[in-house]
């Protein structure tokens, strides 16, 4: 079918707008600040036969583009009994998932009694049970210690919530009164998607919209192939490291051999470290999605749909920690391992096309959880926070300071909101001077923050990274500042044995946690930096002469 270019553009933007409105409803109606303020969620439209992504909201987390595609495919494969009004609830990491806290919902969308697509979303629940409030148990050695694992089950049957399923879920997690609000927010987002898609199909018709989707996929693939064709053929290798798995204090290596051949790229991670004991194993869906997101960072103008991933061939590296199998723990997969996979992609691409690349970013979401009881509010609470860090310098200018993690658009929740919700006080929140990696264009700066417990008691846990090895530079640039954690308990200050990971810190009134997030790597020879920029950094106190 020959489509009018204007009509194609309108439909393309219309589909994206459907998903974006789902994101907005999800955000505005959620109870958890991590979703309503931090935007740790995503919504999308997926193919009725293949489960491939058709469109994602503009404010959805990029890492969920691939993960939700794989989750939807798992639902299509395992649930052949779906009817109008059914909603599947699932967070199983081994079925196209990430970690247990990323809870997905998938619903079949029927138009005029015919299955037309699937609508899916993800919301980060601050808790799904387990040994540690918030789920980031850095010493977990099996998935059961991390929380409730949910296979694809029908939460809604023909539009009616299954009370037994809901009761089972809510009984096994902390702060259930908050979780039911997040559940209804996810359901509401799916319902809005159904209404808006119906309006779109009523206006243009199934045949035209199907044709537009096929053309969008084809154009994305052609555009991605055009970019890849400009990369010199060859094999480029890079290794990125995790500080440890949280249990054994040894570095984990992600080794990438990337081969460019014409308009295709092969990604081989088979030389990476074997499965680990701690929670840094990654479901393959999460690791593979990280490759997709990394390439989207490099070529951001390629529209998101299954077509832009067609030239990317990512071999499944069985026998490594990037392919988690039951019962391996996976809490660090989505927020940490995925960023190190992207770092490997950027490092390999930086050798091939340094003029388009950038030095490494902070490379950690800085996962910090504090759970306990607030006697003044007479309720239990769980605070989950992620923090920003420096982005790497690049060929044109310095890196961004206090940027969000590279896997998403999630922003640190406003500290004023967190102080209203939880019995805490932020005694410091500031730019981390001296953390930028040196270079002709330096990296951006990380942040310092310190949180003090004001009332009751709590338990703190951390799953972070880049505390042993800093974010690497590019083209002669230096590494960014490394992650640092300090915990004060009854006046005694300690640091985690695993530097960037720890759990089980019992907090009393007056105790505090201090976090220093990494800076970005530098780009180019530091000696080539413009002297005026050096003087500016000194004058502003960003750096010292030493």
Image (cartoon, rainbow, N blue to C red):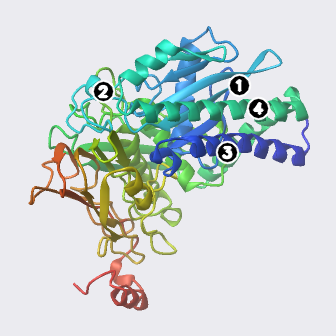
Based on the displayed image, in which of its 4 quarters is residue 401 positioned?
bottom left
**Residue marked by disc 3:** 20
**Residue marked by disc 2:** 319
Image point (55%, 18%), residue name:
75
Image point (39%, 44%), residue name:
335
**Residue marked by disc 4:** 195
Image point (83%, 18%), residue name:
112
Check contact, mark 2 vs mark 3: CB within 8 A: no
User: Does residue 413 lie above or below 48 as drawn?
Assistant: below
Q: Considering depth in this image, is 495 or 357 the residue closer to the camera? A: 495
Mark 4 Cα shell of 10 Å, populated few (<14), some (14-19), many (≥20): few
Say whether disc 1 or disc 4 marks the residue closer to the N-terminus.
Answer: 1
**Residue marked by disc 1:** 117
Is residue 192 shown left or right of residue 104? Answer: right
Q: Secondary structure at mark 4?
A: helix
Q: Is residue 124 visible?
A: yes
Query: How far apart in space, not on screen, are marks 2 and 3 (Cα)?
Result: 38 Å
Check contact, mark 1 vs mark 4: CB within 8 A: no
Q: In the rendering, at what x and y percent does residue 441 appear?
A: 42, 76
């Amino acid at each position: 079918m020959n489509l009018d270019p204007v009509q194609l553009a309108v439909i393309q933007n219309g589909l994206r707008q459907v998903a974006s409105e789902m994101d907005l409803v999800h955000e505005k109606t959620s109870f958890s600040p991590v979703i309503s303020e931090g935007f740790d969620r995503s919504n999308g439209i997926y193919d009725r036969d293949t489960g491939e992504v058709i469109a994602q909201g503009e404010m959805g987390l990029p890492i969920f583009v691939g993960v939700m595609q794989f989750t939807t495919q798992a639902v299509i494969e395992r649930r052949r009994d779906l009817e109008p009004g059914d909603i599947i609830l699932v967070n199983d990491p081994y079925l196209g998932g990430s970690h247990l806290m990323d809870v997905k919902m998938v619903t079949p969308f029927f138009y005029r009694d015919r299955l037309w697509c699937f609508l899916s979303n993800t919301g980060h629940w601050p808790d799904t049970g387990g040994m540690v409030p918030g789920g980031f148990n850095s010493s977990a050695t099996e998935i059961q210690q991390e929380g409730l694992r949910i296979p694809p089950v029908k939460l809604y049957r023909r539009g009616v919530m299954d009370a037994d399923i809901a009761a089972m879920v809510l009984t096994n997690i902390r702060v259930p009164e908050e979780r039911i609000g997040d559940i209804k927010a996810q359901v509401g987002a799916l319902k809005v998607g159904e209404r808006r898609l119906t309006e779109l199909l009523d206006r243009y018709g199934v045949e035209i919209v199907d044709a537009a989707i096929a053309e969008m996929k084809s154009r994305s693939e052609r555009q991605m192939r055009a970019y890849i064709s400009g990369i010199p053929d060859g094999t480029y290798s890079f290794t990125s490291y995790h500080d440890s798995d949280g249990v054994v204090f040894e570095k984990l290596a992600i080794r990438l051999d990337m081969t460019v051949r014409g308009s295709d790229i092969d990604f081989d991670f088979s030389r990476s470290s074997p499965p680990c004991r701690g929670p840094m194993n990654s479901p393959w869906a999460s690791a593979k999605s990280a490759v997709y997101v990394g390439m989207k960072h490099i070529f951001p103008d390629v529209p998101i749909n299954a077509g832009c991933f067609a030239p990317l061939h990512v071999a499944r590296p069985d026998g490594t920690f990037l392919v988690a199998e039951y019962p391996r723990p996976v809490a660090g997969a989505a927020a940490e391992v995925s960023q190190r996979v992207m770092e490997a992609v950027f490092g390999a691409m930086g050798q091939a096309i340094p003029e388009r690349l950038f030095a490494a970013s902070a490379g950690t979401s800085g996962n910090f959880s504090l759970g306990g009881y607030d006697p003044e509010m007479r309720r239990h609470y769980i605070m989950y926070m992620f923090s920003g860090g420096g982005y790497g310098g690049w060929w044109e200018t310095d890196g961004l300071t206090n940027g969000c993690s590279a896997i998403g658009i999630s922003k640190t929740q406003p500290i004023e909101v967190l102080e209203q919700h939880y019995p805490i006080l932020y005694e410091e929140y500031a730019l981390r001077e001296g953390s930028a990696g040196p270079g002709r264009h330096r990296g951006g700066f990380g942040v310092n923050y310190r949180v003090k417990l004001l009332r009751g008691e709590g338990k703190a846990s951390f799953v972070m990274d880049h505390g042993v090895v800093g974010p690497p530079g590019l083209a002669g640039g230096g590494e960014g500042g490394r992650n640092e954690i300090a915990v004060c308990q009854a006046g005694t200050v300690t640091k985690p044995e695993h530097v960037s990971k720890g759990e089980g810190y019992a907090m009393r009134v007056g105790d505090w946690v201090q976090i220093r997030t990494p800076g970005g790597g530098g780009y180019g020879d530091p000696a080539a930096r413009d002297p005026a920029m050096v003087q500016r950094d000194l004058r502003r106190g960003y750096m010292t002469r030493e």
